[in-house]
Image: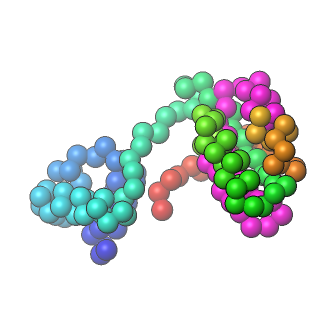
């Protein structure tokens, strides 16, 4: 991967809907060369997906929470069962296994506090795999960027 590929990725990460002809112009390539490079980035697995980001407030999902979780059982089967449960939930947007005092961090995007209460009962309070969890609610977002 060279600097032109990195420039292509920078533009695509900011706006994946950019037309190939405009992308080619910005990175200094012919449209056919640019398209070939983009297809190669997909083929090599460097580009892994393309999504549309929505405004949570306009979508009625404006409560964000970050939940740190300590698990009871650190066995692979128990962890996989718990992760499968999380994967089924619309409000769960990200899950990370982490080092330190907690085992996992879960990011939630919720409609309201009632949804949080119901979800926390299913996933955390009422789940025998969870020993402890601490929830922090996002008061204000200062930076949200997905590009690397």
**15 in relation to 5, above or below:** above
Question: The N terminus is located in which quarter?
Answer: bottom left
Question: Quick one: which residue is furthest to the front in this view?
Answer: 77
Q: Residue at x 66, y 53 (%)?
A: 80
In this view, the residue in front, 94 or 24, is: 94
Residue 123 is at least partly visible in this image: yes
Q: Residue at x 74, y 67 (%)?
A: 99
Q: Residue at x 23, y 46 (%)?
A: 19
Q: How is the image coloured?
A: rainbow
Give the x, y percent position of residue 112: 72, 26
- Residue 95 colored in magenta in the image: yes
Q: Is residue 36 left or right of residue 114?
A: left
Give the x, y percent position of residue 28: 19, 64
How many marks are shown on the rendered structure?
Answer: 0
Residue 27 is at least partly visible in this image: no
- Residue 135 colored in magenta in the image: no
In this view, the residue in front, 148 or 122, is: 122
Question: Quick one: which residue is furthest to the bottom in this view?
Answer: 2
Give the x, y percent position of residue 122: 77, 34
Give the x, y percent position of residue 130: 83, 48
Query: What stretch of residues is rendered in magenta?
Result: 94-121
Corner quadrant of residue 117: top right
Q: Is residue 22 left or right of residue 103?
A: left
Q: Is residue 36 left or right of residue 136?
A: left
Q: Residue at x 66, y 56 (%)?
A: 96
């Amino acid at each position: 991967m060279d600097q032109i590929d990195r420039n292509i990725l920078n533009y695509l990460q900011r706006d994946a809907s950019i037309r190939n002809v405009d992308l080619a112009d910005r990175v200094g390539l012919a449209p056919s060369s640019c398209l070939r490079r983009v297809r190669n980035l997909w083929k090599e697995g460097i580009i892994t997906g393309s999504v549309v980001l929505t405004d949570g407030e306009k979508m009625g999902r404006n409560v964000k929470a970050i939940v740190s979780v300590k698990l009871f059982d650190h066995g692979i089967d128990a962890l996989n069962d718990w992760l499968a449960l999380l994967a089924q939930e619309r409000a769960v947007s990200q899950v990370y296994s982490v080092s330190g005092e907690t085992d996992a961090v879960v990011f939630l995007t919720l409609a309201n506090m009632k949804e949080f209460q119901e979800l926390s009962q299913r996933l955390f309070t009422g789940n025998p795999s969870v020993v402890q969890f601490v929830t922090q609610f996002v008061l204000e977002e200062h930076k949200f960027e997905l590009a690397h």
